Image (cartoon, rainbow, N blue to C red):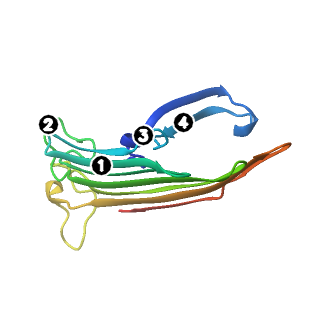
Amino acid sequence: FGATFDPHIADSVDLLTGALPAQYGYRTSGVINLKTRDGLFDTGGEAGVYAGSHATFQPSASLHGSSGSINYFLSGSYLENDLGVENPIASRSAIHDRTRQYRGFGYVSAILSASSRITAFGGTSIGHFEIPNNPGQPGAYTLGSQSTFDSARLDQNQREITHYGVIAYQYAGGDLNFQVAPFFRYSQTRF
């Protein structure tokens, strides 16, 4: 239900569609190219709070800059509201539909020499979602001797966790240019 990437980290987003070049396997599909902010040309940060309807509260903060040959960007955000999942009934407020979402992202790049650099970035996304209730549903099963259940009193929840990271080494010297970039991603959904 939740997004892995926080929109606050995006400097630009491009969508590539159609017949893609060899680096994407000559497939007819789509690729989202998200370029994050960095601190190469300015040092500073920002903090903000967004609040609104459905008890929405969303603070966020970022820090970016450079020091010597190191360039960095860090971001974190939190979101909570009473409309975490689409409401299954035609009313303004859903029953049991609270969400809490945490996201963090970090990027660090260091120039090692005139021909090489190392970059690491990673992030995490943790979301807790209440599954909204749909009152008045007839019972489909019998448990013991009870065949009717109040669907407005259900307490179903889902937790989504995603962690990811990449470390990349780039070399560009003379006729030899290459990049090695191993990555990991861990995702878990608990209902």
Residue identified by numbered label 4: 32
The answer to whether residue 130 is seen in the rendering is no
Residue identified by numbered label 1: 61
Say whether disc 4 or disc 3 marks the residue closer to the N-terminus. Answer: 4
Mark 4 against mark 2, which lies toward the viewer? 4
Say whether disc 3 or disc 1 marks the residue closer to the N-terminus. Answer: 3
Say whether disc 3 or disc 2 marks the residue closer to the N-terminus. Answer: 3
- Figure quadrant of the C terminus: bottom left
* Disc 3/disc 2 C-alpha distance (Å): 47 Å
Q: At 54% from the left edge and 36% from the top edge, which residue is drawn?
A: 32
Residue identified by numbered label 2: 91
Say whether disc 4 or disc 2 marks the residue closer to the N-terminus. Answer: 4
Q: Secondary structure at mark 4?
A: strand
Looking at the image, the residue that sits furthest to the right is 175
Mark 4 against mark 3, which lies toward the viewer? 3
Camera-nearest residue between 100 and 74: 74
Residue 22, image quadrant: top right
Q: Taking 190 as reference, is 46 left or right?
A: left
Say whether disc 1 or disc 4 marks the residue closer to the N-terminus. Answer: 4
Q: Secondary structure at mark 2?
A: loop
- Going by the numbered disc 1, the residue's amino acid type is Ala
Looking at the image, the residue that sits furthest to the front is 68
Camera-nearest residue between 51 and 45: 45
Mark 3 against mark 2, which lies toward the viewer? 3
